[in-house]
Amino acid sequence: MDFSIIIDNLPLLFKGLGLTLQLLAISLVIGFILSIPLSIMAASINPWLRIPVKTFIYIFRGTPLLIQIFIIYYGFSQFDWLRESIFWVIFKQAYWCAVIAFSLNTAAYTAEIFRGAILQTQKGEIEAAEACGMSRFDQYRHIILPSALRRSIPMYGNEVIFMLHATVLAGVITLVDLFGAAKIINSRHYAPFESFISAGLFYLVITFTIVFIFKLAENHFLKHLKR
């Protein structure tokens, strides 16, 4: 194993790492924000709210993320009305197409996680809130959502890790993320072991960091359940 190849290309790897973390962070923030109202609508008894959201969730969970990226980046460009609109500034850039695809994908998975947690909220908690005269909005704000989000921490941690691994697909639309940097190093030096092992170690460190953070969050927010 030639360590000089790894050392000489560390700037490229760190640049790819920066893009990977950037894509991950932006997609998770947007996806989380979208997932809150989507999960509430998916848990609603009103079919006009539930069915469209469930359809969205099924489509994005039932199709490969790679196909979703291709549709957004390559497919939408065939529509003249989009190329002539103000939105073309966004859709012509691979970076924002990747962000859109990742955000919608993680929003669908996260919404389903939160929906399940909302439906598992103890009936006694809701009845107590109703007895106190809380409106449905206040019930979600003070009782249902805080309880559901706390109980979703372990599952959401897995989704964050899955999303980290999914960012490697950004390379298929010309973005040089961490995996893309490893491919460039391999093409320059014909050293697949050194290049991909290096990228794998970076992913391992990020994954262990995410696991550690969510473990701390579990210990803090789910302390009462462990007792």
Image (cartoon, helix red, strand yellow):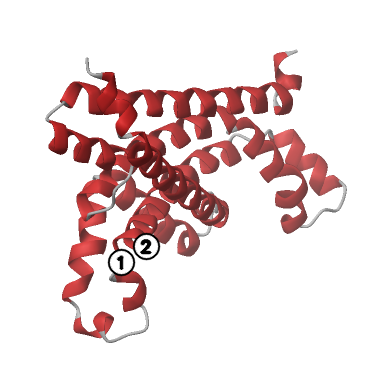
**How dense is the environment of label 1, judged by Cα within 10 Å: few (below 14), some, or many (20 and up)?**
few
Q: Position of residue 8 (x, y in %)?
A: 31, 32
Q: Nearer the viewer, residue 175 or 15?
A: 15
Q: Position of residue 81 (x, y in %)?
A: 25, 85
Q: CA distance from mark 1 to mark 2?
A: 6 Å
Q: Position of residue 56 (x, y in %)?
A: 37, 56
Q: Residue at x 75, y 34 (%)?
A: 124
Q: Quadrant of residue 120?
A: top right
Q: Are marks 1 and 2 in contact (CB under 8 Å)?
A: yes
Q: Secondary structure at mark 1?
A: loop
Q: Give the number of callouts.
A: 2
The reply, left or right, for residue 93 in relation to residue 117 is left
Q: Quadrant of residue 51?
A: bottom left
Q: Which mark is residue 168?
A: none
Q: Residue at x 33, y 55 (%)?
A: 98
- Residue 86, placed above or below residue 34: below
The reply, left or right, for residue 186 in relation to residue 109 is left
- Location of the N terminus by quadrant is top left
Disc 1 marks which residue? 93
Q: Nearer the viewer, residue 51 or 144?
A: 144
Q: Which mark is residue 96?
A: 2
Q: Nearer the viewer, residue 9 or 157?
A: 9
Q: Secondary structure at mark 2?
A: helix
Can residue 9 be seen here? yes
Q: Quadrant of residue 194?
A: top left
- Location of the C terminus by quadrant is top right
Can residue 65 be seen here? no
Instruction: Name the amino acid type tagged 2.
Output: Trp
Q: Residue at x 72, y 56 (%)?
A: 136
**How dense is the environment of label 2, judged by Cα within 10 Å: few (below 14), some, or many (20 and up)?**
some
Instruction: Name the amino acid type tagged 1.
Output: Gln
